[in-house]
Amino acid sequence: MSSLQRVRHRENQRGLALISPTLLWMIGLLIIPLILVLITSFGRRDPDGNVIYAFDLSNYIRLTGLSTSQPCGATPAPCFDSLYVTIMWRSLVLAFQTTLLVIVVGYPLAYFVARAPARRRNLLLFLILVPLWTNFVIRVYAWIMILRTQGVLNGLIGAILGLVHIPFTPLSMLYTPGAVLVGMVYEFLPFMILPMFTSLEKIDNSLFEAAADLGANNLRTFLRVTLPLSAPGVVAGTILVFIPVMGTFIVSDILGGSQVILVGNLIQRQFLDARDWAFGSAASIVLMVLTLIVTVIYARRFGFGDEIAF
Amino acid sequence: MPEFAVELHNVVKQFPGPTGEIVTAVNNVTMQIRDGEFFSMLGPSGCGKTTSLRMIAGFELPTSGEVLIHGKPMGQTPPYQRPVNTVFQSYALFPHMTIGENVAFGLQMKNVARADIGPRVTQALEMVRLPGYEKRRPKQMSGGQQQRVALARALVNRPEVLLLDEPLGALDLKLRKEMQLELKKLQREVGITFIYVTHDQEEALTMSDRIAVMNQGKALQVGQAAEIYERPNCRFVADFIGETNFLDGTVKSQNGREAQVELASGQMASAESEAQLTAGQKVSVAVRPEKVGLGNAGLGNSFQGRVDEVVYIGTDTHFRVRLPGGQSLRARQQNSQSADQPLAQVGDDVTVGFAPAAARVLAE
């Protein structure tokens, strides 16, 4: 072994030592559990709710709705049951809607904060982060107070309409897809605002002046300079929001009740209520694959954004 | 076409300072920049030169006073409606666009026909000697190249006035010297009025038709390079541009342009002054070291002194001569003959002198 090789060897060892805590963490708490989930997903549930390990694709077939063993409705012949496909489609659509709305609501906010005078900027960022100090579940519960029939929002609308003597029947807003969407947008907004803010704040002020100097009014400056230069923040925020939204079950559980069931809820119920770990595992794998596909397509088109170092 | 490209009339700009006090960046500046000239604003940092430029560009609006471009009052006109373009100190090239897109930006904003944009971009890049660089990105270019792209991006719009904010500040010395000459040549070719902001006196002297020397928000003197160097109108200008000896004294008498000044040592010196002086007024006599003669009498003003420093720098030798009364006079002698022995050595008693026409009386 030459001395150069020896140095390199020693450096490799040192590198391994440095990453080993992270590596152990990843292997022990991510990779091994993932393999266990994958193995479980091919198993079956026994009558007591335990897992019988096997190699059986029935859980996946059941998710597609093309079940051959369970008849649906009155017809004894095998038929298509759209239940799980609908749940997955609903999750996907809701994740898209949430991400889009979070961008629309978050961008002006991030822009406003980034353009604020330096001293006020920190205060505004602080205000955006303050809600995160409260527990996630409690924050979602707060929306029940706002959205329920006797809630704050209905009270407010009623009071305003009362002033102009228009009769008002309180709206039922809770336990609707809209309520879940509002809750999701509220919960995930900071994760979009922060990377967008970072992107916007990095833009050198002289670039705006250069655009104005070259004849661009405010709108054209925004479209040609601000927007393209802040795109990496939007891309990063989209990834940070879309992935967790796809898997979350708390918001839909609390604000959607039994009306809005998402993949997250399906998985949670299989593990806790139905005690069918095998089917829950299969649903988890499908969710992961689905999220991965969307993310990869997206990342291929737009990159991961400079705000996440991959 | 009016005679002046840009006029500033009693322009004042005040900013709120960090602790709430009012900072006056530009204090009642009036100047007129002629059409087609290379005009420099020269001064130390914080003298108000950049703020003045930004008010011409429209990035700042004057607190009071007026900015006119070709006789038209600018008032609240936003930057994108002014017939001027700026070359920024940081270049401010758009990082997400190619060089071609950067240069085309201004033309697109002015809705120039698509078919005309391509050729004009090509031509502009050729003018700054960067032909065929359209597809590159700003990041792939050196500082000097970026600087030239910034120039092309501004000039392609054929502005009435080009504003340059210390555009060579970030370049190394050699490149800076090259670019100075190139800029001057370019300005002569395109015939556009250039307003150039710099803190580098040599840069200003090299390139400018006229220079405004600024300090503490005021334009102290406006004139041609030689005028400012030879006939500074105040102590700051004499001190800021080149090297100057200042001999303090009081005015004894004045006869036309020539004034008699009694120096602190009690000796008399005569020097020029356009201003009307009063007897007993505290003044300085300013004289450039290269105009101080060593060892030869008959220059009009001559003094006895003792050499206390000799520095040989190749082309010149610098002497410092201490005069009775404590003041000292620096003299610079060109080494035009190959002399192994300098004119004088440390400790020698010598006669130093200067012509009255080479010296200026400057009021305190």
Image: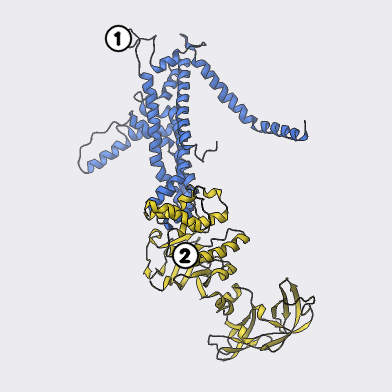
The residue tagged 1 is A74
Left-right relation of B40 to A108: right
Q: Nearer the viewer, residue A10 or B118?
A: B118
Residue B228 position, x and y percent, is: 56, 76
Quadrant housing residue A82: top left
The mark closer to the camera, 1 or 2, is 2
Chain A: its colour in the image is: blue
Residue B262 position, x and y percent, is: 64, 88
Provide the chain ID for the residue under circle 2: B
Q: CA distance from mark 1 to mark 2?
A: 88 Å
Residue A203 position, x and y percent, is: 48, 49
Q: Is residue B21 visible?
A: no
The local secondary structure at tag 2 comes to helix
Residue A12 position, x and y percent, is: 69, 32
What residue is shown at x 36% (from left), y 19% (from top)? A83
User: Which image quarter is the N terminus of chain B in?
Assistant: bottom left
What residue is shown at x 31% (from left), y 37% (from top)? A153
Amino acid at dot 2: Val
Quadrant housing residue A252: top left
Amino acid at dot 1: Ala
Could you say which disc has been placed on residue B190 in the image? 2
Q: Is residue A6 visible?
A: yes
The local secondary structure at tag 1 comes to loop
Left-right relation of A82 to A210: left
User: Which image quarter is the C terminus of chain B in?
Assistant: bottom right
Q: Nearer the viewer, residue B232 or A288?
A: B232
Q: Nearer the viewer, residue B215 or B242?
A: B242
Q: Nearer the viewer, residue B320 or B23?
A: B320
Provide the chain ID for the residue under circle 1: A
Image: A229 above or below A139: below
Residue at the far top: name it. Answer: A76
Chain B: its colour in the image is: yellow
